[in-house]
Image: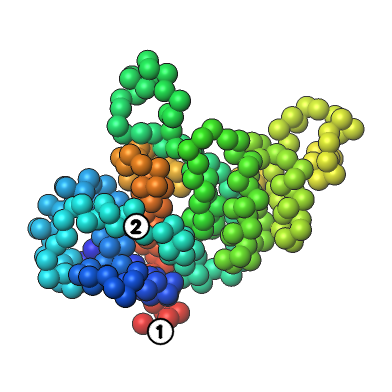
Amino acid sequence: MKHSRMIRILLDIIRKARIQPYLHKYSNHMYTVWQHLVLLVLRQYENKSYCRFLDFLHECTGIQRYLGLSRLPHYTTLQKASERLESTILHKILSEFVLYIKVRLILVGIDATGFGYNQSSYYYTKRARLRRKFVKMSIAADMKYQVVCCIKIRHRQRHDSVDFVSLLEKTNQIIPVNTVLADKGYDSEKNHVAAEKLGIVSIIPPIYAGVPVYKTKGHHRKMLKRYGYDRTTYHQRNKCETIFSVIKRMFGDCVTSRKIVTQNRELTYRIIAYNYHRIIQNNLLVVVWFLHGL
């Protein structure tokens, strides 16, 4: 029952995102893109490796019937499909979740977290002094329903503030943003100006609260120090930490893929699985079915 409901929601979202069933007309048409997407998201939801996930599918005959699979794909087929499917397709599905729950004006929180590598132990990584210690993922999420709108993944150490403007612009293109919340790590006059140009209220506390106003650079940063900000609204930003906690507890805090491309895909599938989880937890499915007349 749980998996059939998940597959039904994912297929509905993929259909609304207008994803083509096949990438090319000359493909072998053995498996559709929809089937690959559902299986890859379901693998992240079950938090299993490719081999263990195929063993899981052998026991779940209901999933095979629901997806119309006459035979199960080899685990390497799913690995190749994960690398072949473009990130634009996955981001379209990710943004469709926000439209799916009929959100009209959102309160956005932006934050970043890191995911470790599963190829080597933490002890070896620390002793060998490896440079690549984690993958950084920045998200823009709706603070009311805690649904992730868009993400940005980096494999080099960069400041969190670098991705603020791009995340805010992408989210605003999906659905209008009312207010954006971020912690002190995003304190920059550039971020305030970018939000103002989009007609968005930005609440980003100044990083150096003890510095006098006349020594603070930037009009918006001075106004925040002089007049303050709504702390009740700003505390909604803490839900970003809740989102990261749920993702890591349910789906793991490490990436198992070795290539950079597949690591990006793996994290994106993980966020799609999380968005489905939030729809079920918030009982939004009943509201969605009522709005769609189902």
The reply, left or right, for residue 15 in relation to residue 167 is left
Res 65 → quadrant: bottom left
Q: What residue is shown at x 71% (from left), y 47% (from top)?
A: 191
Residue type at mark 2 is Arg
Q: Position of residue 241 (x, y in %)?
A: 50, 42
Q: How many labels were placed on the picture?
A: 2
Q: Is residue 214 above or below residue 261?
A: above
Which badge, 2 or 1, is on the more N-terminal residue? 2
Q: Position of residue 82 (x, y in %)?
A: 32, 54
Residue 203 has which mark? none
Which residue reaches farthest top?
Answer: 127
Q: Which SS class for mark 1?
A: loop
The reply, left or right, for residue 22 in relation to residue 49 is right
Quadrant into which the N terminus falls: bottom left
Residue 227 can be seen, yes or no: no
> Label 2: which residue?
84
Res 80 → quadrant: bottom left
Which residue reaches farthest front?
Answer: 26
Q: In whole angstroms, how far apart are the C-alphas of marks 2 and 1? A: 36 Å
In depth, the one of 141 and 24 nearer the eye is 24
Q: Is residue 43 above or below residue 102?
A: above
The reply to whether the C-beta atoms of the residues labelled 2 and 1 are less than 8 Å apart is: no
> Label 1: which residue?
293
User: Depth-wise, is mark 2 or mark 1 nearer the camera?
Assistant: 2
Q: Residues within 10 Å of mark 1 (few under 14, many from 20)?
A: few
Q: What residue is shown at x 41% (from left), y 37% (from top)?
A: 115
